[in-house]
Amino acid sequence: MRVLGANCSTRAVNVAVVQDGNVLDGLPERLRPAQGIELGDRLLEFIDDVARLLAQVRPDRVALLLPEAQRRGSASYQSVAPRLTIETLFRVASAREGYPLRLIARPSVRAALDLPKKGSLDDHLESAGEPVGRYWRDGRGLAALAALAEGAH
C-alpha cells in the first residue's frame, strides 16, 4: 500500500510517501503555493499543482495531519488562515482527483504508532526511520509519521 502523508504550514504542504513501511526517496517533498494565493487564479493553480503531485505519486490513501491543539482564543484569524487555505485546497484537489483523504489527529498518530504521549510529535521523528530527503525537521518528518499511521490503520 502506498500512502501519501501531508503536513501543512502557513507557507507550504510537506509531503512524504510511505510504501510497505518505508519512506520513499525521489518523489516530491514540498509544494508551495504562489505568492498572493488569496487571489482566485492562484487558488486554482495550487489545486492543479496538488493534482499533478497526486498523479505522480498515485497513492492508495492520503493522510493529512491536523495541527497541534491550541488553547481557546490563542490563535488569530491572520495566523491560521494561510494554513487553513492550504489544507482546504489540498483536500479539494484530493477529492476532485478521487483520492480518499483522512484527516488524522496527532493523538491518533501516536496511538497507531505506539508513540509516547509526552512531548510534541516532532520529538518522535526517529519513529519514521532515517530522515529521507529535505525538510525532514521542517514538517516532512511529520508527514511521514501521518503516512505511517494511516498505513497501520
Image: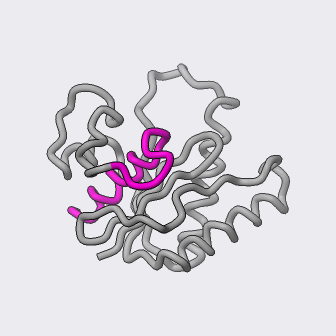
Q: Is residue 30 left or right of residue 127?
A: right
The structure residue drawn at horizontal position 33% and vertical position 42%, both measured from the top left corner, is: 106
Dominant secondary structure, magenta: helix
Tag count in the figure? 0
User: Which quadrant of the rendered structure holds the N terminus?
Assistant: bottom left
Give the residues drawn in magenta, as a range. Answer: 131-153
Q: How is the image coloured?
A: one colour
Residue 105 position, x and y percent, is 35, 46
* Quadrant hosting residue 97: bottom right
> Is residue 133 located in the magenta-colored stretch of the structure?
yes
Residue 23 or 116: which is nearer the viewer? 23
Residue 98: x and y, percent?
A: 51, 79
Q: Nearer the viewer, residue 79 or 141?
A: 141
Look at 56% across and 42% down and name the residue there.
9
Q: Residue at x 64, y 30 (%)?
A: 79
Q: Is residue 136 left or right of residue 52?
A: left
Quadrant hosting residue 110: top left
Residue 20 placed where, x, y %?
24, 71
Q: Quadrant of the C terminus?
A: bottom left
Q: Is residue 79 left or right of residue 122?
A: right
Q: Residue 127 placed where, x, y %?
A: 23, 46
State the residue at coordinates (27%, 26%).
Answer: 119
User: From the viewer's perspective, is residue 138 above or below residue 59?
Assistant: above
Task: Report the residue that reaches farthest toward the left.
Answer: 114
- Magenta stretch: includes residue 85: no
